[in-house]
Image (cartoon, rainbow, N blue to C red):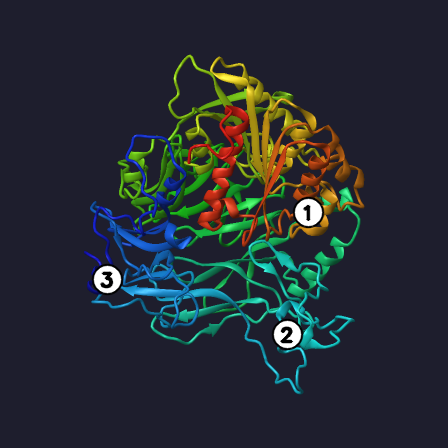
């Protein structure tokens, strides 16, 4: 079946990319990556298989160079093959497709004007015009019949008309005094500053957040039910506590959800958390395992909930067995312990651990109608789709994997077809399908074929090595474009952020950028990275810059010993945690000839007061600065800045509230005063995510500056003359 008739005019010709071509004329290949090639790379995400398994919808995102923006559309491809087709208008943004269980609608998210909310739909069972909103088709968890949906919303708020004029009504939101403020503007029309009384008043990517105009109140998330074909919503619960992640059983009789383990009110939970947050760090209290949530079941028509089992830890990713008798969930016994998959009878009993002591951790779960329980997982730097052993006696079976990263596993209603996106070191993301058993894999989209034909993407050699404490570390060495045996090349090590993120087996613009300049690119996942189990991930608590630094320098030792690496011309770069680590490295070694640091942190006490994420160091450094000031100071690179001799390029975003500007400013001034070569580039209208989701022109400018910096110091290229 083709696209709805009225959508045909929006389809792109077969050879056309899903957005405007880059304005810059580029030479044909094969050749090294040029900066303008970045605009040509298409990202495919959020695959959704239709219930009958005949189509896959996806989000397709591409930069529009001329407009300095990214643009996302919904595209659909037949699983039997053929060209993908655009199903949403190129004049609006659209993403996150999902099918109705009966296959009559394709829903998606869009900010387009003319409706309420962001959910829109294309009708498929009859000729359709433009996308519309369908108030009679609820969005939520549905039984196998698709007769109704269950979802959560706050209870309706009783409103009271305010009396009297509000003298602050016309002020900018951040300028208005909060309900509990002691001071007030002398003349409201003349004050356009920011008035802050709350602890959380800024968020990265959002900006400054106004304080409360009224006293704090709570609207717990309640369970609601809506019958398909009817606009009426039935409120099933009226409690003081919130219900989360509701899932309806396939037979439609039950709702499973997560709630507080003691069904305490939201207000009691928040006030307790606030009180504990003010106390000094105490290991006996703060490190003890907690049971904050539990799994509950109630009738789908309402009634009294029943706790399935008191289970220590947190539960998420609930899914029902096809026969509606069992529940599976991802359970994490504590923050620093690995998540497992558990199965429990809906009537109660002890949950069974299906993963045992398997090293890795599960992602999203799918309990197929065939009875198989399948899940995605990161396995070090790669990822896979696996099938759990229902007895829990054997390790999970890997169905789809390899040296690549897989995302967004989606299945048809019969549990026979699997769709996912995949990317490897030398291939940007595309859509693939296979049987649910992982057999007969086929690539369905080819959005990046043209750029892949022009550009020779560099591949990387994977290796592992033993570091401090005999811990095994995974790393990769990407070869420079035009690599020739017998020659020596400069090398740059990349350090990821987090610290609990990870590098992996996927296409990455930053690595390709420097490899195209003719440099080796080294990247590793030192201890603290995710994807290797919780013990590995949290082994750096209180020890940032210690064993993790040794892990990184050990990889440099290994690579520097190669005959094709010029150990006299090495550089280092990284962002966020990697920004901290690169400044830390600069204080500990002069081995690198140049360093570039992004989103750096140079003084942890300053960072604590200026960031939007104080909880990070409260957990990682065992308390607030005044609880553990010695550790905050010991791990602050600025305390040792007088040791720095390495030329450094600092890149910072003006609206970064995660790692604010002050760290870079004090570092820049300190190096400048000492005569160390240093430059700082500050990007406007940009936050902590500039390198990932920032304005395309600024993102590409950053790539160019990193390339120029290392080309100058490691290759002797004239200032500003690096390839672009």
Q: Which residue matches tag 1?
A: 662
Q: Residues within 10 Å of mark 3 (few under 14, many from 20)?
A: many
Q: Residues within 10 Å of mark 1 (few under 14, many from 20)?
A: some
- Tell me the SS state at disc 2: loop
Whether residue 636 appears in this view of the structure is: no
Task: Check the image and name the residue furthest to the front.
Answer: 718
Q: Which residue matches tag 3?
A: 7
Instruction: Check contact, mark 1 vs mark 2: CB within 8 A.
Output: no
- Residue 514 is situated, as x and y percent measured from the top left of the image, at 46, 31
Instruction: Report the side of 190 relative to 396 (left or right).
Output: right
Quadrant where the N terminus is found in the figure: bottom left
Instruction: Check contact, mark 1 vs mark 3: CB within 8 A.
Output: no
Spatial CA span between label 1 and label 2: 29 Å
Quadrant where the C terminus is found in the figure: top left
Which residue is at the front of the view, 315 or 591? 591
For marks 1 and 3, the one nearer the N-term is 3
Label placed on residue 372: none
Which residue is at the front of the view, 615 or 436? 615
Instruction: Report the side of 678 relative to 245 (left or right).
Output: right
**What residue lies at 43% left-to-right and 41% top-to-bottom?**
376
For marks 1 and 2, the one nearer the N-term is 2
Whether residue 275 appears in this view of the structure is: yes
- Tell me the SS state at disc 3: helix
**What residue lies at 36% left-to-right and 62% top-to-bottom?**
92
Q: In this view, does 411 lie above or below 262?
A: above
Q: Nearer the viewer, mark 1 or mark 3?
A: 1
Which quarter of the figure has residue 142?
Answer: bottom left
Instruction: Check contact, mark 2 vs mark 3: CB within 8 A.
Output: no
Q: Which residue matches tag 2?
A: 171
């Amino acid at each position: 079946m083709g696209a709805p008739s009225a959508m045909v005019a929006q389809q792109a010709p077969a050879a056309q990319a899903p957005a405007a071509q880059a304005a810059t004329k580029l030479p044909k290949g094969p050749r090294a990556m040029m900066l303008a090639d970045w605009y040509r790379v298409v990202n495919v995400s959020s695959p959704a298989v239709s219930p009958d398994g005949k189509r896959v919808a996806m989000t397709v995102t591409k930069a529009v160079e001329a407009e300095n923006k990214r643009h996302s559309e919904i595209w659909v491809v037949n699983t039997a093959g053929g060209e993908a087709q655009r199903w949403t208008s190129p004049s609006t943004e659209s993403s996150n497709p999902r099918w109705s269980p009966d296959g009559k609608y394709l829903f998606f998210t869009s900010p387009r004007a003319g409706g309420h909310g962001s959910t829109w739909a294309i009708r498929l069972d009859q000729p359709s015009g433009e996308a519309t909103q369908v108030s009679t088709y609820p969005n939520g968890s549905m039984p196998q019949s698709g007769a109704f949906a269950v979802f959560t919303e706050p209870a309706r708020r009783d409103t009271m008309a305010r009396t009297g004029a509000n003298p602050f009504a016309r002020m900018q939101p951040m300028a208005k005094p909060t309900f509990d403020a002691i001071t007030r503007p002398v003349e409201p029309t003349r004050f356009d500053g920011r008035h802050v009384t709350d602890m959380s008043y800024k968020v990265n990517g959002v900006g400054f957040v106004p304080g409360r105009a009224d006293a704090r109140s709570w609207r717990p998330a309640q369970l609601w039910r809506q019958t398909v074909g009817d606009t009426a919503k039935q409120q099933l619960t009226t409690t003081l506590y919130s219900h989360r992640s509701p899932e309806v059983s396939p037979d439609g009789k039950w709702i499973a959800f997560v709630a507080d383990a003691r069904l305490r009110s939201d207000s009691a939970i928040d006030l307790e958390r606030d009180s504990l947050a003010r106390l000094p760090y105490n290991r006996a209290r703060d490190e003890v395992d907690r049971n904050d949530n539990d799994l509950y079941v109630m009738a789908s028509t309402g009634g009294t909930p029943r706790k399935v089992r008191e289970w220590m830890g947190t539960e998420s990713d609930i899914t029902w067995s096809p026969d509606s008798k069992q529940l599976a969930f991802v359970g994490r016994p504590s923050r620093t312990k690995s998540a497992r998959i558990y199965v429990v009878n809906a009537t109660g009993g002890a949950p069974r651990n299906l993963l045992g002591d398997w090293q890795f951790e599960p992602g999203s779960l799918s309990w197929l109608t065939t009875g198989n329980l399948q899940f995605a997982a990161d396995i070090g730097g790669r990822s896979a789709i696996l099938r759990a052993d229902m007895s829990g006696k054997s390790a999970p079976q890997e169905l789809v994997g390899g040296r690549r990263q897989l995302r967004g596993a989606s299945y048809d209603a019969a549990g026979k077809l699997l769709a996912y996106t995949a990317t490897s070191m030398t291939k940007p993301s595309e859509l693939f399908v296979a049987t649910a058993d992982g057999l007969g894999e086929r690539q369905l989209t080819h959005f990046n074929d043209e750029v892949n034909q022009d550009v020779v993407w560099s591949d990387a050699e994977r290796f592992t090595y033993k570091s401090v404490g005999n811990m095994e570390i995974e790393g990769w060495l990407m070869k420079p474009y035009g690599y020739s045996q017998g020659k020596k090349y400069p090398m740059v090590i990349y350090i990821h952020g987090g610290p609990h993120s990870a590098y992996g087996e996927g296409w990455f613009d930053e690595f390709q950028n420097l490899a195209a300049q003719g440099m080796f690119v080294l990247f590793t996942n030192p201890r603290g990275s995710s994807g290797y189990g919780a013990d590995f991930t949290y082994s750096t608590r209180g020890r940032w810059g210690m064993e993790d630094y040794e892990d990184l320098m050990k990889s440099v030792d290994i690579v520097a010993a190669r005959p094709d690496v010029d150990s006299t011309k090495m550089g280092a770069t990284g962002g966020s945690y990697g920004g901290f680590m690169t400044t830390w490295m600069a204080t500990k070694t002069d081995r690198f000839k140049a360093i570039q640091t992004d989103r750096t942190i140079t003084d942890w006490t300053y960072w604590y007061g200026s960031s939007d994420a104080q909880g990070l160091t409260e957990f990682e450094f065992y308390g607030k600065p005044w609880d553990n000031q010695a550790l905050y100071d010991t791990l602050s690179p600025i305390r040792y800045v007088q040791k720095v001799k390495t030329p450094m390029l600092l890149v910072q975003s003006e609206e970064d509230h995660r790692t604010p500007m002050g760290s870079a400013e004090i570092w820049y001034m300190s190096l400048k005063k000492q005569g160390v070569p240093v430059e700082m580039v500050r990007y406007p209208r940009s936050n902590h995510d500039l390198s990932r989701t920032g304005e395309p022109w600024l993102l590409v400018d950053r790539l160019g500056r990193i390339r120029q910096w290392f080309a100058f110091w490691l290759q002797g290229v004239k200032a500003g003359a690096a390839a672009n």
